[in-house]
Amino acid sequence: LVDVESNWHFSALRAIPKDVEDFKLGELAVDIDSKAPMLSGLLEVLLSARNRRKQGSSESGAAHAHAHANPDDDEVLLEGQVRAPSSPEDKRETKRKEKEKMLTIKKAVITSILMQSSNQKANNLQSLVGIFLHSCCTPERVVNALARMGVSISMTAVLTAIKSLSNEASRSLRELGQTLLASYAYDNFDVNLKTSMPVVENPFETLKHLTSGLLIRLEHGVTREHLKCSAELWAKSHLNP
């Protein structure tokens, strides 16, 4: 799992958007099951201990527990909401699937921590977590604390990855613009930046007027020849004398 051939290495210095887009937690879980079956089985036994203790309860008791499950339990849906199945059987099946999802996530996280402790470069999951925390404006001390736990990479590595991703994004946008097969969209917006206290001697305008731009690739087989229509537009224009 920790070998470079397993494709679970992440280089913050050479990070590209494809590294983030291609990461699938399910693929990591399948890889763990296939390459480390004994470890996977051990984690499954340890993480399912609470469920096994409840197997001695009656069917009616189990149905009652499923029907009155605490939404604050860690087995709830990852989206943070609980659907309402139409029958008791559907409720039990939904609950079972959610437990399986949480078990898969826990196994992947624990195994990733062990992988990173064996090979510092086997940090794919930790890198994705660090980038996600950065996108949520998580404080640096929190990111570094999670990095020491083995759940994330350090803030320095996160910033390195963000810089590499930004450089790659800039290169991709430049290449897209040079194809002349893109449209440009602009949007004006205001931001109130309360970064200092304005005083009479040094007044500071906190309201900033900014413009954002978006480059949109032209799809549906559009070519440069299709865009050479200025003569036809001018011929049909009401401004043409």
Image (cartoon, grey):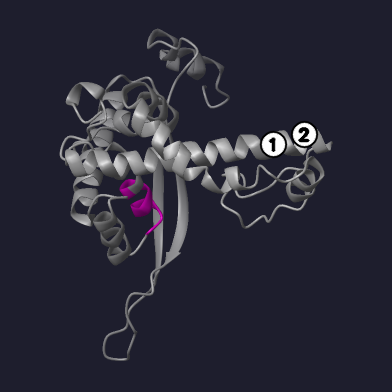
Q: Which disc is residue 229 wearing?
A: none
Can you identify the residue that label 1 sits on?
94
| Image point (20%, 44%), residue name | 117
Q: Measuring 40% from the left and 36% from the top, which residue is drawn there?
A: 42
Q: Quick check: can you spot residue 190?
A: yes
Q: Is residue 115 left or right of residue 73?
A: left
Indicate left or right for 115 with 69 as reference: left
User: Which residue is situated farthest in the right direction here?
Assistant: 87
Q: Quadrant of residue 99?
A: top right
Q: Is residue 138 above or below residue 61?
A: below
On the rendered image, what quadrant is the N terminus found in?
Answer: top left
> SS for tag 1?
helix
Q: Which residues are magenta?
A: 130-137
Give the residue at x 41% y 55%: 136
User: Magenta stretch: dominant SS?
Assistant: helix
| Residue 74 spot, x, y in % from top left | 56, 51
Q: Residue at x 38, y 69 (%)?
A: 193
- Nearest the eye: 74 or 157: 74
Amino acid type, callout 2 = Asp
In front: 21, or 74? Answer: 74
Residue type for callout 1: Thr
Q: Secondary structure at mark 2?
A: helix
Quadrant of the rendered image containing residue 89: top right
Check residue 90 in the rendering and tell me which mark sits there, or answer none.
2
